[in-house]
Image (cartoon, rainbow, N blue to C red):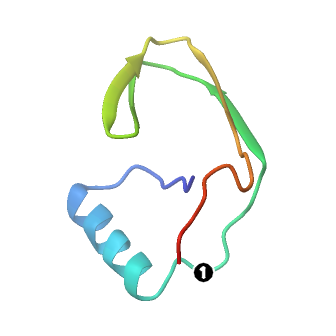
Amino acid sequence: MVIFPHMPKWRVLLTALRATTQGLGDQPSVSSYEFTTLKPLPYQIDGEVKSVDAGTFVRIECAPSALPVLG
């Protein structure tokens, strides 16, 4: 997961383009991340968009080598 500050959509596009061509450089790394939502928050898992209510505690944990990668 990479966290970006809020920015206009055109800037998100430029950042994504730069990430695919030049990379994002060194990024901080953690094995888990947790927060409580301040407002309803949409999220996407495997192409399906869902949502959590405001005040929901969320914990995201990294599972190294959980997905096989071809290549």
**Badge 1 local density, few (<14 within 10 Å), some, or many (20+)?**
few
Q: Quadrant of residue 21?
A: bottom left
Q: Quadrant of residue 27?
A: bottom right
Instruction: Point out residue 55 in the picture as x, y percentages from the top left corner.
Output: 55, 11
Residue nearest the viewer, comparing 27 with 63:
63
Does residue 40 appear in the picture of this structure? no
Note whether 27 is above or below 31 in the view shown.
Answer: below
Circle 1 SS class? loop
Q: Residue furthest bottom?
A: 22
Image point (61%, 53%), residue name: 67
The residue where tag 1 is placed is 25
Q: How many marks?
A: 1
Does residue 54 appear in the picture of this structure? yes
Q: Residue furthest left?
A: 10
Image point (53%, 70%), residue name: 70
Residue nearest the viewer, comparing 46 with 7:
46
Image point (23%, 56%), residue name: 9
Instruction: Point out residue 17 in the picture as x, y percentages from the top left corner.
Output: 32, 77
Residue nearest the viewer, comparing 50 with 26:
50
Q: Residue furthest right?
A: 31
Type of amino acid at the residue the image marks with label 1: Gly
Q: Quadrant of residue 47?
A: top left
In this image, 9 relative to 19: left or right? left
In this image, 37 relative to 44: left or right? right
Note whether 58 is above or below 12 in the view shown.
Answer: above
Image point (38%, 20%), residue name: 51
Instruction: Point out residue 13 in the picture as x, y percentages from the top left corner.
Output: 26, 67
In this image, 22 relative to 68: left or right? left
